[in-house]
Image (cartoon, grey):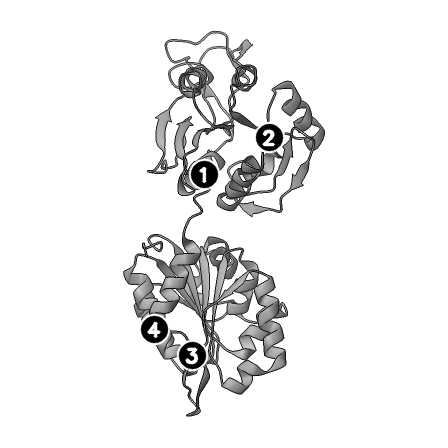
């Protein structure tokens, strides 16, 4: 099975089961495979394996409580890590920790991280056979399963009590195999060609100054990364940003709305999907000064002209492509977004307010041509990007 762990952030939760000694091997293997590993321990777990062991194996501070001094560099550390995680593994997972997670109890760092994270969760139970067969424990496992928690084990074997029965934690290699499976990207966009724009254009006033906007390009880059991970052939046309383009995407850099227009029109042919996530300027200076305008002059008046409406032209030139636009509004968000969708002949519009600018998360409305509205909760832009792609596929 291919290694899906490189550059993935994995939180390993360790609760108070004797099998915690095997979690040391798990952490070491995850680290060897290129993952960024963080360990969160319950108070009971520290009595079985010392935090320094996991600190050494992971190369990161160990999370012992919600106010750990070691994590002082992270704002609200447990929430920061919860949002950063690609996957959370709880190994060993005792009957106690399973019960807490199933019933929404967050009374320590580990349970708080688990409940605050939208990442996939893998639970590796380890307990006495009678505990595993207890009807309450079974009900808690069923509840977690219904909420998309994944399980590996328990296996049959020799238990701490001396019995040979079910309840033994799965071996680290079996857990690694399951983790790879959970992190394996969805290939539902294989064979699709997608053009994505990103960033905010710059309209020159003089060689130094320009008219711009607050777009960071994060959503467009997240869309390009997600689409490539799902098998698409991606062209990313980007205005200037501080972001590094996904290596799997073909990157084309532009500066102005005119540059963006020319690049999009050149590459729009044969695209299955076009997603215009860039914040293209609506206006540009009518006159661009060829030398820097000196500050000692008595003010400066700029006359603005409209830029080319790229989205409108794409809507008029559609030839089987699905066209997705974005609407950033300060008022009447849904109404204005629906109006833009119709005027620009879009298949889907993604609407949000200005809070999304420069942020790492967004709260979006997805509106299609039939007037269906999907309200997404506030999500990290990486996850929001996949939800947008899901909506496009449904078209």
The mark lying in front, picked from 1 and 2, is 1
From the top left corner, tell me how far across and down residue 375 is, in percent.
Answer: 66, 42
> Can you give x and y, in whole percent of width and height, for residue 72 in the image?
44, 61
Are the residues flagged by discs 4 and 2 in contact, CB closer than 8 Å? no
Most extreme residue toward the bottom is 162
User: Which of disc 3 and disc 2 is earlier in sequence?
Assistant: 3
Determine the secondary structure under disc 2.
Answer: strand
Give neighbour class at mark 2: few <14, some 14-19, many 20+ (Cα, 10 Å): many
Left or right: 100, with 268 as reference point: right
Name the image quarter holding the N terminus. bottom left
**109, 169: nearer the viewer:** 169
Q: Nearer the viewer, residue 306 or 165?
A: 165
Q: Quadrant of residue 313?
A: top right
Instruction: Please identify, in this view, whether the residue under mark 2 or under mark 3 is nearer the observer.
Output: 2
Asked which quadrant contains residue 171, the reply is bottom left
Residue at the spot of label 2: 348
Q: Which residue is mark 3?
A: 46
Q: Which element type, helix, strand or loop, lies under badge 3?
A: helix
Circle 3 crowding by C-alpha within 10 Å: few under 14, some 14–19, many from 20: some
Q: Secondary structure at mark 4?
A: helix
Tell me: 361 left or right of 23.
right
Seen at 65% across and 40% down, the residue is 374
Which residue is the extreme one toward the top? Answer: 287
Question: Which numbered mark, 3 or 1, is in the foreground of this view?
Answer: 1
Q: Position of residue 130 (x, y in %)?
A: 54, 87
Give the mark, 4 or 3, whose residue is nearer the N terminus: 4
Asked whether residue 164 appears in the rendered view, the answer is: yes
Whole-Å distance between the Cαs marked 1 and 2? 17 Å
| Residue matched to label 4 | 24
The residue where tag 1 is placed is 189
Q: Decide: is 158 above or below 21.
A: below
Q: Does residue 359 appear in the picture of this structure?
A: no
């Amino acid at each position: 099975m291919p290694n899906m762990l490189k550059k993935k952030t994995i939180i390993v939760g360790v609760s108070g089961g004797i099998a915690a000694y095997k979690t040391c091997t798990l952490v070491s293997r995850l680290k060897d495979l290129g993952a960024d590993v963080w360990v969160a321990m319950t108070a009971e777990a520290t009595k079985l394996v010392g935090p320094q062991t996991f600190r050494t194996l992971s190369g990161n501070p160990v999370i012992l409580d919600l106010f750990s001094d070691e994590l002082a560099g992270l704002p609200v550390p447990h929430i920061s890590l919860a949002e950063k995680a690609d996957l959370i593994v709880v190994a060993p997972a005792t009957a106690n920790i399973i019960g807490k997670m199933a019933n929404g109890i967050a009374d320590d760092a580990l349970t708080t991280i688990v409940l605050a994270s939208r990442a996939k969760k893998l639970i590796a139970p380890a307990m006495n056979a009678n505990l595993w067969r207890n009807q309450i424990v079974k009900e808690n496992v069923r509840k977690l399963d219904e909420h998309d928690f994944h399980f590996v084990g328990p296996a049959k074997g020799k238990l701490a009590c001396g019995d040979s029965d079910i309840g033994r934690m799965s071996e680290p290699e079996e857990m690694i195999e399951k983790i790879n499976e959970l992190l394996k990207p969805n290939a539902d966009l294989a064979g699709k060609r997608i053009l994505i724009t990103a960033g905010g254009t710059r309209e020159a006033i003089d060689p130094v100054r320009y008219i711009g906007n607050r777009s960071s390009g994060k959503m467009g880059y997240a869309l390009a990364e997600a689409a490539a991970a799902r098998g698409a052939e991606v062209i990313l046309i980007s205005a200037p940003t501080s972001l590094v383009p996904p290596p799997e995407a073909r990157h084309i850099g532009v500066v102005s709305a005119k540059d963006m227009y020319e690049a999009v029109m050149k590459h729009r042919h044969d695209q299955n999907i076009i997603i215009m996530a860039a914040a293209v300027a609506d206006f540009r200076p009518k006159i661009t000064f060829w030398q820097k305008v000196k500050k000692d002059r008595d003010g400066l008046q700029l006359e603005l002209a409209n830029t080319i409406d790229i989205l409108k032209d794409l809507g008029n030139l559609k030839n089987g492509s699905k066209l997705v636009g974005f609407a950033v509004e300060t008022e009447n968000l849904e109404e204005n977004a629906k109006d833009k969708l119709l005027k620009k002949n879009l298949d889907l519009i993604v609407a949000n307010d200005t809070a999304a600018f420069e942020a790492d998360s967004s709260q979006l409305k997805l509106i299609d041509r039939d007037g269906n509205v999907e309200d997404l909760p506030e999500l990290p832009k990486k996850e929001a990007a996949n939800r947008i792609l899901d909506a496009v596929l449904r078209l």
